[in-house]
Image (spheres, rainbow, N blue to C red):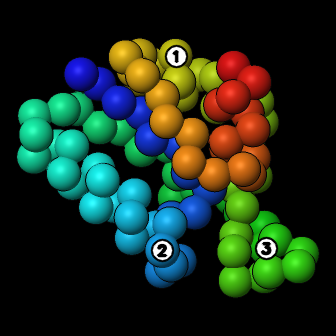
Amino acid sequence: MHILLVTDAWYPQVNGVVRTLDTVARLLRAAGHRVTLLTPEDKPTFPLPTYPEIRLALVSPGAVARQIDETRPDCIHIATDGPLGWFARRH
């Protein structure tokens, strides 16, 4: 199965969400699944105003939709409520 994990929390952040999703992706792959991550990595980001250590991806709904369509996952898990999660859900 091809699983797309969508998260607004990713490295270089180190927190429970990032560590958990990294472990989940590793274990799913070890079980034979194909896992793709849609994260803020390699995207412009901005600091969350009330929590500047958290940086959110500066993306458009269309860009997220294109990434999902190109990936063609069997299922999508949206792990966080940020721009990536909102736009993935909207798609």
Between marks 1 and 2, how big is the CA–CA gap? Answer: 29 Å
Marks 2 and 1: in contact by CB < 8 Å? no
Q: Tell me the mark number nearer the camera, choosing from 1 and 2.
A: 2
Residue 16: x and y in percent read 48, 74
Instruction: Name which residue lies at 18% across and 32% down.
Output: 33
Task: Give the residue pinned by disc 2.
Answer: 16
The reply, left or right, for residue 56 in relation to residue 68 is right
Residue 9: x and y in percent read 57, 63
Between marks 2 and 3, how big is the CA–CA gap? Answer: 19 Å
- Mark nearer the N terminus (3 vs 1): 3
Identify the mark at residue 69; answer none if there is no mark. Answer: 1
Residue 8: x and y in percent read 62, 56
Task: Give the residue pinned by disc 3.
Answer: 47
- Mark nearer the N terminus (1 vs 2): 2
Q: Tell me the mark number nearer the camera, choosing from 2 and 3.
A: 2
From the image, which quarter does the N terminus lie in?
Answer: top left
Residue 12 visible from this viewpoint: no
Q: Is residue 1 above or below residue 27?
A: above
Residue 71: x and y in percent read 41, 23
**Mark 2: amino acid:** Gly
In the orientation shown, which residue stands out farthest toward the right? 49
How dense is the environment of label 1, judged by Cα within 10 Å: few (below 14), some, or many (20 and up)? few
**Mark 1: amino acid:** Asp
Q: Is residue 24 above or below residue 34?
A: below
- Mark nearer the N terminus (2 vs 3): 2
Q: Secondary structure at mark 2?
A: helix
Q: Secondary structure at mark 3?
A: strand
